[in-house]
């Protein structure tokens, strides 16, 4: 079947790779992001037959009014969204909780949680009415393994995991599928540049000496989950590079300074 795939955060990283992947396989894509020039250059880079199947829209997922109305104002060609990829998201900072900026926490909550929830609520009714749909949410290993400085970012991704599973519970009796994809270390996206607020040298060091996952790897996993036979649902899918694994618990020895 030919899908109409809505991808949030299509201007970079996983979202852009996912957009390209579905278009290359003949599907239609609605690509969302805030940076208009990035959406335009994405479109311009595609062959003409793919351009006809791409609708770009400058949308901030934190603009809840715009998002709530989105499903009702799409052009007819793109109106029946069959796959929603809730990818837009970010981490800000790596400070311990007692030093982190509240404004960073608010933005992560607004984007990773509220944006994702509003997008889902906007498109789910149509999927249920048409008895056809798949919601694919970008979680993270940060949902499953705490790490220093992960505080609110990990918390938002734990929300994404549980929300995804609860959607499955609500959608029993419908053919609508829900998947939460939980990647570990992925290089070649803007994730760490955003986390370190434009300190690109610091962002680079995160991936130094590691063959990390790539945006194309994630797009492949999304495409795989979306194109499995319709009776199969991937609930959770956690991915890491081979060069990443888990650490031991940390223990503070000695007295606390009073
Ligand atoms: P990037 O920073 O490369 O891309 C993020 C995308 O989200 C951009 O296209 C950005 O577009 C968009 N975006 C951010 N805020 C908003 C907003 N308010 N409204 C609309 N779009 C927005 O990140 P990645 O591709 O690496 O990450 C994508 C997702 O995967 C995120 O949810 C992230 O948490 C998750 N993830 C990433 C991992 C990694 O290591 N890279 C690992 C695990 C999960 P624009 O600025 O144009 O709006
Ligand atoms: C992104 C992966 O380990 O930086 O979600 O949290 S991590």
Image (tube, rainbow, N blue to C red):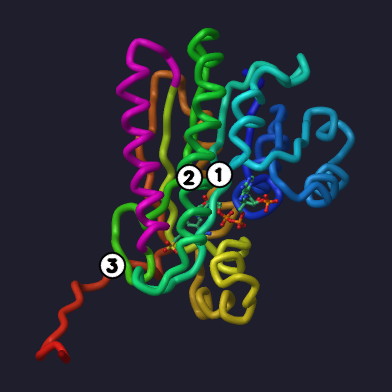
Residue 199 vertical placement versus 159 (above, below): below
Residue at image coords 34%, 52%: 143
Residue at image coords 53%, 49%: 218
Q: Which callout, 3 or 1, points to the residue nearer the camera?
A: 1
Q: Position of residue 44 (x, y in %)?
A: 88, 45
Residue at image coords 86%, 39%: 47
Residue 199 vertical placement versus 13 (above, below): below
Front residue of 257/67: it is: 257
In terms of secondary structure, where does tag 3 sit? loop
Give the position of the N terminus as an image quadrant: top right
Residue 201 lies in what quarter of the image?
Answer: bottom right
Separation (CA) of disc 2 from disc 1? 5 Å
In terms of secondary structure, where does tag 2 sit? strand
CB within 8 Å, label 2 to label 1: yes
Which residue was labeled with disc 1?
87
Q: Is mark 2 within 8 Å of ligand 1?
A: yes
Left or right, residue 247 beside residue 207? left
CB within 8 Å, label 3 to label 1: no
Front residue of 201/54: it is: 201
Q: Main secondary structure of the magenta part?
A: helix
In terms of secondary structure, where does tag 1 sit? loop
Other-residue count near label 2 (Cα within 10 Å), few / some / many at <14 / 14–19 / ≥20:
many
Which residue was labeled with disc 2?
138
Give the position of the C terminus as an image quadrant: bottom left
Q: Position of residue 168 (x, y in %)?
A: 35, 25
Other-residue count near label 1 (Cα within 10 Å), few / some / many at <14 / 14–19 / ≥20:
many
Image mark for residue 246: 3
**Which of the two discs, 3 and 2, labels the residue nearer the N terminus?**
2
Image mark for residue 61: none
Q: Is mark 1 within 8 Å of ligand 1?
A: yes
Please report the bounds of the magenta region as a residue range. Answer: 151-176
Residue 160 vertical placement versus 167 (above, below): below
């Amino acid at each position: 079947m030919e899908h109409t795939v809505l991808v949030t955060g299509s201007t970079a990283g996983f979202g852009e790779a996912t957009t390209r992947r579905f278009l290359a396989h003949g599907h239609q894509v609605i690509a969302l992001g805030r940076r208009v020039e990035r959406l335009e250059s994405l479109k311009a880079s595609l062959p003409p037959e793919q351009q006809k199947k791409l609708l770009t829209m400058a949308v901030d997922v934190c603009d809840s009014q715009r998002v709530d109305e989105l499903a009702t104002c799409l052009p007819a060609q793109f109106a029946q969204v069959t796959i929603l990829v809730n990818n837009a998201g970010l981490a800000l900072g790596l400070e311990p909780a007692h030093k982190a900026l509240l404004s960073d926490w608010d933005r992560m909550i607004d984007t990773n949680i509220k944006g994702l929830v509003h997008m889902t609520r906007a498109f789910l009714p149509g999927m249920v009415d048409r008895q056809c749909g798949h919601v694919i949410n970008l979680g993270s290993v940060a949902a499953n393994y705490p790490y220093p400085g992960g505080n609110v970012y990990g918390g938002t991704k734990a929300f994404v995991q549980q929300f995804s599973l609860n959607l499955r519970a609500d959608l029993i009796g419908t053919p609508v599928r829900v998947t939460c994809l939980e990647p570990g270390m992925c290089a070649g996206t803007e994730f760490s540049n955003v986390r370190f607020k434009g300190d690109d040298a610091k962002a680079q060091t995160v991936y130094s000496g590691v063959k990390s996952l790539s945006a194309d790897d994630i797009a492949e996993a999304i495409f795989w989950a979306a194109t499995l036979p319709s009776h199969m649902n991937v609930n959770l899918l956690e991915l890491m590079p081979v060069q990443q694994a888990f650490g031991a618990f940390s223990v503070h020895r000695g007295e606390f300074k009073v």
